[in-house]
Amino acid sequence: MVLTEMEHHSDIVPWQMLAEERGVELRYVPVLPDFTLDMDVFSASLDGAKLVCVVHTSNVLGVRNPLEAIIEQSHAVGARVLIDAAQGVPHASIDFTEFGPDFMAFSAHKMCGPTGIGALLVAPSAFVEMQPFMGGGDMIETVTVDGSTYQTNEHKFEAGTPRIAEAIGWSAALDWMASFDLDAEHARLVDIAGWVAQQLRELGMTVYGRHGPDDAAVVSFLHPTINSDDMAHLLDARGFAVRTGHHCAQPLLQRLGIPGTVRASFYIYNTRDEAEAFVAEMKDIVETFS
Amino acid sequence: MSFYPAALQELIDEFQEIDDKRERLEYLFELADEVNEFPTSQWGDATRVRGCQSEAHVHIEVDNGLVHFQSGADAKMVQGMMGILTIALEGLAPAQALMIPPDFAEAMGLLNTLTPSRSNGFRNMFDKVMADIRQQVEG
């Protein structure tokens, strides 16, 4: 299996558990100093690979990976591709079939929906090869004391009572998101993030990310002397919620040589005025506490 | 209330007068100046506060029958909490220090400012300091 150093723990730990159970070899594609994947190592890693798992967009850096090339090269050697699109689907309209991976996973709570529910999209050619992984109610066709037969459609993966309330909530969130022009929103937000990143650099911050047109509107940064947690508490007291720490992506932070970052994320409910207020408060914090 | 030494009670009163979360936090940061610095060169396993989100170290000495408290941390906020403990403990007789209950952080309204992991860290620091004082007294 080919993974990358940019993955969220959710796309590393299950594979490490599987590797331990089945003796699967895991290969990790490194992240370069410009925050992109080392595509030369990626190409070399494909030799003999069966499955390639890559994050669509890094939750730390906001960098959107060259997925079209990754899918094409992987398929050329007969490897299947899983895209962790938790940070991709909220920021771009993706046509799964046209996009072309074999699997694509994402979470409701990253797209304005409830926690505790997610989706795995599966290409038909992979679907027919997949067997149920969990037994119980609903996933069966018939059950006798001698044995059971299983559903052949998607219900074969959905044993037991489904997450009904969460599904209804997610559906409502998707309806709400559909009222936005996602592509236009994306362009607006990346523009805001790029501006914030530049302002933070001018304030002496190190910014981790590049904020290109396809990247997500997250700004990860560190101040040379103000502790990340202190920064987060100071911002919180001024009305701004940021995330600190390793962002569940420790291998990436190990590669960057830092224990964590402060991360400001911008989404469809944020305005330019809020970004300007954020920068103004950051200026004040830096002047007062550095 | 009677357990709190005068300096600590005064600090509790001051915190209780601050209604604004931001002011309370920034006052906590100022209290970092109260810390008797514990040099990083002496930080080690024995001085580390476990279960604290930050790297935090404390050192207790009982000299001439009085508690001397040194501390250091990588976050200003933790240093501020150490500053409070310094005001509370410095120069007290060990028996008097050991009578301080741990709930003054709550009385100061600090637990509303802190995240749960931070307030656990504060409690761990308090418990370690008290255990270190007890150990010094009992040898």
Image: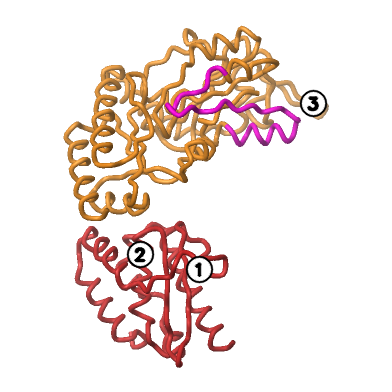
Chain colours: A orange, B red
The part of the image, by quadrant, that contains residue B67 is bottom left
Residue A279 % position (x, y): 21, 40
- The answer to whether tags 2 and 3 share a subunit is no
Chain identifier of the residue bearing label 3 in the image: A
Chain identifier of the residue bearing label 1 in the image: B
Alpha carbon distance from label 2 to label 3: 57 Å
Within-10-Å neighbours for mark 1: few <14, some 14–19, many 20+ = few
Which element is circle 2 on?
A: helix
The part of the image, by quadrant, that contains residue A208 is top left
Residue A218 % position (x, y): 34, 32
Within-10-Å neighbours for mark 2: few <14, some 14–19, many 20+ = some
Kindly identify the amino acid type of the residue bearing the numbered disc 2. Leu
The extreme right residue here reads A146
Residue B130 % position (x, y): 49, 79
Kindly identify the amino acid type of the residue bearing the numbered disc 1. Gln
> Residue at 39% across / 32% down in the picture?
A113
Mark 2, residue position: B111
Kindly identify the amino acid type of the residue bearing the numbered disc 3. Gly
Q: Which mark is residue A147?
A: 3
- Quick check: A275 above or below A4? below
- Quick check: A194 above or below B56? above
Mark 1, residue position: B42
Q: Earlier in the sequence, mark 1 or mark 2?
A: 1
Range of the magenta residues? A12-40
Which numbered disc, 2 or 3, marks the residue closer to the eye? 2
Do tag 1 and tag 3 residues touch (Cβ < 8 Å)?
Answer: no
Along the horizontal axis of the image, is A187 left or right of A256?
left
Do tag 2 and tag 3 residues touch (Cβ < 8 Å)?
Answer: no
- Between A161 and A104, the one lying in front of the other is A104
Residue B128 % position (x, y): 51, 73
- Quadrant into which the N terminus of chain A falls: top right
